[in-house]
């Protein structure tokens, strides 16, 4: 299509000549008008590609004023026609951005050249503006901060990400030196880096990545910093573009992955340690329980004999021995609870039970009393609350950790009237999840925490204690325990005034406690095979279970399979899970192949190993935590004897 041109000329003969000349050149003339008003009206309707404008027009506006209005309204290029070439007229014409100036009279060839140059130049300008808009839109859309600079390092453009980074709109910083807005540092050496150095030293893109920090708007952020120079047609640097990638989220993700890896490794180690501790605990507790039974029998025997000083002394000695054994048993149970709490790191899921929250808090206060009383006085504000649907040992461990943290905070406080306030109350405020919760608040008047520290205290391995004074795992484990138990934990703190940790745990649906009387044994007797690789564990299980059942022991799963093939049948099998050569899972699968009816009669003992969790969730068998509660184990054996048919009914 030929270009469309409007002629604005107040002399009719000159206008007619221009129309004829343009037609012969192959252009289409949209209109030939004599004043500014008709020119603007025609331009609004037809939008010509070029206007040939006489400067001296009839009416209120001259050609220069009309050209400026065309430029502002529709970006239409103008070539001026004039019989005058004085400096004032030429200066006014230049200020409108005119694309040509023809001095009357002009030749046909001069008109043709002026029109072609004007059309071509305007086309190039349009392309450049389109490219500029395209580049600007692209820069504004990218997620990284982009800042364009002139040759003096002053800001000419910023995208939205850069505005957010610098915390200021582009309009307020345009023209300011980049050095006044941002600073660069080497994270390791804290050496300052020049943000403009890449553009000053080379004409290639320069990247500062790895260990580079940016300070802007009072914040320090890890970044990747790139700068590309802008070259003019002569190859000289006339500006630069800086691109800044904020690595904060990436660093946080990397740290979380690293923490997860460390926790995974720690979980594997913890599982092994727990297993090794639970084995000796099994025979310590088992022997203590066996000895308590023996002491009770001896006391009955002594009391049935004739009275005398020797008899009384012996009875008193047995009472003392009974007390000592109970203390030893209680201490071993507390060790077992602590070992069970290590299962948080190996993601072992304990079955929720019910417990008395006040009782668990009293236990934690007793255990931590020596650490607290030296630095603070304790205030109890306990209201009657129903049982909580949590496992008491694990909840007590959370309380103990929070109390010890409070004692540490008050140790460093200069307040001579330190108080530790422990509150327990029913909290029924609306919330997602369980509507009835118990709130346990532990408030101290210690050193408190700044807001940025309070946000991070539940992160694994984050600690404000000096090296060697804390691992940074305590509060992370507390949060994991409380979350796993269906509750949540929060903190409010003010630097210099103290902190308050609030633990919310769900109320049990049925108000029953874990201390309800256990059902009595029925006295059923069966033949039990006990499998464990630790001879001391086998010994205590043989003695304890042997009072009620015929017990056969085996120090390994492979040997147990051989015994099952060669010896008489067994009614119940008590099997440790973690054993060398063949573990409990492999033993179960082999029993399922050879004696499928007997596989359901296997009771597993476990010492908290993460690898066991997936297996236990795939089988219906009972799993009892080491060290086992012997009454619970005896009741489980009786249930199998009571519910399942005797061994002779099972055929190979």
Image (cartoon, rainbow, N blue to C red):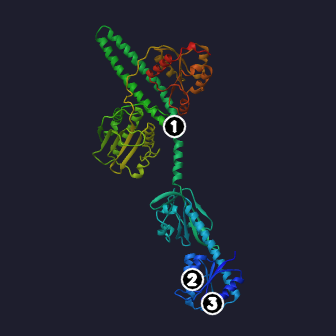
Q: Is residue 271 visible?
A: yes
Residue beneath disc 1: 267
Q: How many residues crowd around disc 3 within 10 Å: few (fewer than 14), some, or many (20 or more)?
A: few
Residue 95 can be seen in this image: no
Q: CA distance from mark 1 to mark 3?
A: 97 Å
Percent coordinates x, y for residue 439 in the rendering: 36, 40
Marking on residue 28: none
Badge 3 marks a residue whose secondary structure is helix
Give the quadrant of the C terminus.
Answer: top right
Residue 476, above or below 135: above
Assign the N terminus to one quadrant of the image. Answer: bottom right
Whether residue 31 is situated above or below residue 259 in the rendered picture = below
Which residue reaches farthest top? 306
The residue indicated by pointer 2 is 38
From the viewer's perspective, is residue 460 above or below residue 128? above
Q: Which residue is mark 3?
A: 12
Alpha carbon distance from label 1 to label 2: 86 Å
> Secondary structure beneath disc 2?
helix
Q: Earlier in the sequence, mark 3 or mark 2?
A: 3
Find out whether the residues at labels 1 and 2 contact each other: C-beta distance under 8 Å: no
- In space, the residues marked 3 and 2 are separated at their CA atoms by 15 Å
């Amino acid at each position: 299509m030929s270009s469309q041109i409007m002629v604005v000329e107040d002399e009719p003969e000159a206008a007619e000549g221009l129309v004829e000349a343009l037609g012969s050149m192959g252009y289409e003339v949209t209109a030939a008008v004599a004043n500014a008003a008709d020119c603007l009206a025609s331009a609004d309707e037809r939008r010509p590609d070029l206007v040939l404008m006489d400067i001296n027009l009839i009416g209120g506006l001259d050609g220069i004023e009309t050209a400026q209005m065309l430029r502002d309204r529709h970006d239409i290029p103008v070539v001026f026609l004039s019989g005058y070439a004085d400096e004032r007229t030429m200066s006014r014409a230049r200020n409108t951005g005119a694309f040509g100036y023809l001095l009357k009279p002009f030749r046909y060839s001069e008109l043709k050249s002026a029109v072609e140059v004007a059309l071509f130049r305007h086309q190039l300008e349009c392309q450049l503006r389109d490219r500029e808009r395209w580049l600007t839109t692209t820069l504004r859309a990218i997620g990284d901060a982009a800042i364009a600079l002139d040759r003096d390092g002053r800001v000419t453009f910023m995208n939205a990400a850069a505005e957010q980074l610098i915390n200021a709109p582009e309009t307020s910083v345009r023209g300011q030196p980049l050095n006044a807005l941002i600073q660069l540092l080497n994270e390791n050496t804290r050496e300052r880096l020049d943000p403009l150095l890449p553009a000053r030293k080379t004409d290639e893109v320069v990247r500062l990545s790895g260990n580079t920090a940016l300070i802007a708007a009072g914040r320090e952020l890890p970044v990747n910093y790139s700068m590309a120079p802008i070259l003019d047609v002569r190859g000289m640097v006339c500006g630069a573009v800086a691109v800044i990638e904020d690595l904060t989220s990436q660093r946080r993700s990397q740290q979380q992955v690293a923490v997860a890896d460390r926790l995974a490794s720690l979980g594997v180690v913890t599982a092994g340690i727990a297993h090794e501790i639970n084995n000796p605990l099994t025979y310590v507790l088992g022997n203590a329980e066996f000895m308590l039974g023996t002491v009770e029998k001896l006391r009955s025997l002594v009391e049935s004999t004739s009275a005398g000083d020797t008899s009384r002394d012996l009875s008193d000695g047995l009472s003392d021995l009974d007390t000592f054994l109970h203390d030893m048993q209680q201490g071993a149970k507390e060790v077992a609870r602590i070992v069970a709490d290590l299962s948080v790191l190996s993601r072992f899921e304990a079955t929720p039970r019910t417990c008395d929250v006040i009782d668990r808090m009293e236990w934690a206060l007793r255990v931590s009393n020596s650490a607290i009383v030296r630095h603070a006085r304790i205030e109890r504000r306990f209201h009657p609350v129903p049982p909580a649907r949590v496992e008491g040992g694990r909840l007590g461990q959370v309380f103990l950790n929070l109390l010890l943290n409070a004692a540490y905070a008050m140790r460093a406080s200069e307040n001579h009237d330190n108080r530790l306030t422990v509150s327990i109350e029913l909290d029924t405020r609306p919330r997602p999840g369980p509507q009835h919760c118990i709130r346990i608040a532990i408030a101290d008047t210690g050193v408190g925490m700044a807001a940025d520290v309070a946000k991070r205290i539940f992160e694994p391995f984050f600690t404000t204690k000096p090296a060697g004074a804390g691992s940074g795992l305590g509060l992370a484990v507390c949060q994991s325990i409380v979350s796993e138990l269906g509750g949540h934990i929060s903190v409010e703190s003010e630097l210099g005034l103290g902190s308050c940790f609030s633990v919310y745990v769900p109320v049990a649906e049925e108000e029953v406690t874990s201390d309800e009387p256990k059902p009595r044994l029925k006295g059923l007797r069966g033949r039990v095979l006990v499998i464990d690789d630790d001879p001391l564990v086998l010994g205590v299980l043989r003695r304890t279970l042997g009072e009620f059942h015929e017990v056969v022991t085996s120090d390994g799963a492979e040997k147990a399979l051989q015994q099952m093939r060669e010896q008489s049948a067994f009614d119940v099998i008590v099997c440790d899970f973690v054993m060398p050569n063949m573990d409990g899972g492999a033993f179960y699968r082999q029993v399922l192949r050879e004696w499928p009816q007997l596989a359901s009669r296997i009771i597993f003992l476990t010492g908290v190993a993460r690898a066991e969790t997936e297996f236990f969730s795939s089988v219906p068998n009972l799993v009892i935590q080491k060290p086992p509660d012997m009454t619970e184990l005896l009741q489980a054996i009786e249930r199998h004897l009571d519910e399942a048919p005797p061994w002779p009914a099972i055929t190979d």
